[in-house]
Structure formats: C-alpha cells, structure tokens
Image (cartoon, rainbow, N blue to C red):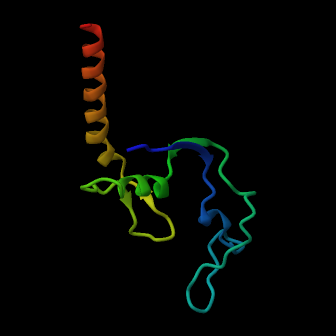
C-alpha cells in the first residue's frame, strides 16, 4: 500500500465563520453558521506534515481487509485514524528488517 505524505497549512472552515462583535459565530435562520469567503487568507501559519485522508482511503480500498484508517463520520472533514497505522508500520519494519538480514547474510 503506497501512502502519500504531504506538507500543508490547515485552512479550516471554522477560520471563516462570520463572527459578531463579541467573537461568536453568526447563524442564519436555519441555524447554520454564516461563512465569510474562504480565500485562503486565514489559513494557519504552521506547516503540518501529515497524510491526506482521501488518498489514504483510496490506498486502503486496495486491501483485501480494510482496517479503518479513515474516519468519515463528518463527510465535510475526513480524519486519519493514525493509531490504525501502527500495526501496518510494525509489519513494514519487520519486512524491512528481514530484507536487511537477508542482504547481510549474503
């Protein structure tokens, strides 16, 4: 399974909530938060290195037994279940260690 890792700045929707004078989100008549235009100007400053959930989901679909790497509870904002990656990484390390041992024994 090939999983891309990417660097990016978080550009969260909540950073574009229209706020009142007291800093509270303003809601429309249906109770939805009114959004300002998302032009990227309010993206967070820190740069994050992480997995892209959609790419990880595509890679996981190629597995015979998917292991729940992507949390899709909120269709607007998928999340990566990083703890589900631990067994995958441990297996990969074991495979690499076995290859190294094989090469060293030649």
Name the residue: 30% across, 16% down.
100
- Quadrant of the snapshot with the N terminus: top left
x%, y% of residue 7? 59, 42
- Residue 53 in the image: state x and y as whole percent: 46, 55
Residue 91: image location, x then y, percent: 25, 35
Quarter of the image where the C terminus is located: top left
Q: Residue at x 27, y 28 (%)?
A: 95
Residue furthest front as drawn: 106
User: Left or right of 4: which side holds 68?
Assistant: left
How many numbered dots are placed on residues in this image? 0
Q: Is residue 98 above or below residue 105?
A: below
Residue plotted at (24% across, 8% down): 105
Where residue 39 sits, quadrant-wise, is: bottom right
Q: Is residue 92 above or below residue 53?
A: above
Task: Name the side, left or right, on which 57 lies relative to 97.
Answer: right
Q: Is residue 30 above or below residue 67?
A: below
Of the pair 81 and 99, the residue shown nearer to us = 99
Q: Quadrant of residue 40?
A: bottom right
Across and down, in percent, residue 33 comes to: 60, 78
Residue at 67 percent across and 75 percent down: it is 35
């Amino acid at each position: 399974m090939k999983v891309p890792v990417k660097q990016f700045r978080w550009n969260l929707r909540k950073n574009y909530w229209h706020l009142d004078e007291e800093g509270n989100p303003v809601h429309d008549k249906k109770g939805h938060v009114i959004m300002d235009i998302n032009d990227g100007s309010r993206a967070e400053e820190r740069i994050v290195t992480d997995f892209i959930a959609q790419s990880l989901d595509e890679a996981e679909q190629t597995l015979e037994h998917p292991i729940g790497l992507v949390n899709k509870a909120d269709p607007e904002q998928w999340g990566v279940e990083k703890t589900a990656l631990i067994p995958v990484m441990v297996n990969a390390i074991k495979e690499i260690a076995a290859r190294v041992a094989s090469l060293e024994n030649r």
